[in-house]
Image: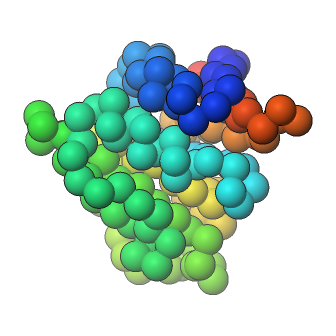
Amino acid sequence: MTELRIKSLEDINSVAKQFVELIGDRRVFAMYGAMGVGKTTFVKAVCEALGVEDTINSPTFAIVNEYRTPKNKVVYHFDFYRIEDVQEAYDFGYEDYFYSKALCFIEWPERIESILPSDVVNLNFTEEEDGGRTIHVLMD
């Protein structure tokens, strides 16, 4: 397990770059943590580290947002908070995304754990007493 520490918003870009270097060829990331802990903000910082110039925001109502890097690599950002059951993920064709070799960042993965790929990387976000954040990165 690796711990990434974000002491303040000023640190997030350097931590995002560190994360990009850490992940290697891993592609699917399940992001666990309370609402407001910074999952979307972290995805935004990672996208910026990858050179994405699109507006990056929460896909709460769209379920998935797609971004492209200058090298035409794709990043998918999911938010499953509003789905009722895993069948909704089947209905929109989650396999096409998760197995596309694109980067996939998944908020509220608890709602679809039964269909997460076996090589998913778990990111556990916690808020510290000083207001900072710690991301516990669990990968095989």
Q: Quadrant of residue 57?
A: bottom left
The residue furthest right is 129
**Residue 40: % across, % down:** 52, 52
Quarter of the picture containing the C terminus is top right
**Residue 108: % across, % down:** 63, 60
Image: 96 above or below 122: below
Q: Is residue 34 visible?
A: yes
Residue at the image point whose x is 50% and y is 72% from the top: 60
Taking depth in this image into account, of 111 and 62 the one nearest to the observer is 62
**Residue 10: % across, % down:** 54, 29
Residue at the image point whose x is 12% and y is 37% from the top: 70
Image: 56 above or below 20: below
Q: How is the image coloured?
A: rainbow
Image: 52 above or below 80: above
Q: Please tell me how many numbered marks the rendered image carries.
A: 0
Left or right: residue 24 compared with residue 120: left
**Residue 106: % across, % down:** 52, 53
Quarter of the picture containing the N terminus is top right
Q: Quadrant of residue 129?
A: top right
Image: 70 above or below 63: above
The residue furthest left is 71
Residue at the image point whose x is 52% and y is 65% from the top: 79
Taking depth in this image into account, of 63 and 117 the one nearest to the observer is 63
Residue at the image point whose x is 19% and y is 40% from the top: 69
Q: Is residue 100 visible?
A: no
Left or right: residue 20 compared with residue 123: left
Left or right: residue 14 compared with residue 56: right
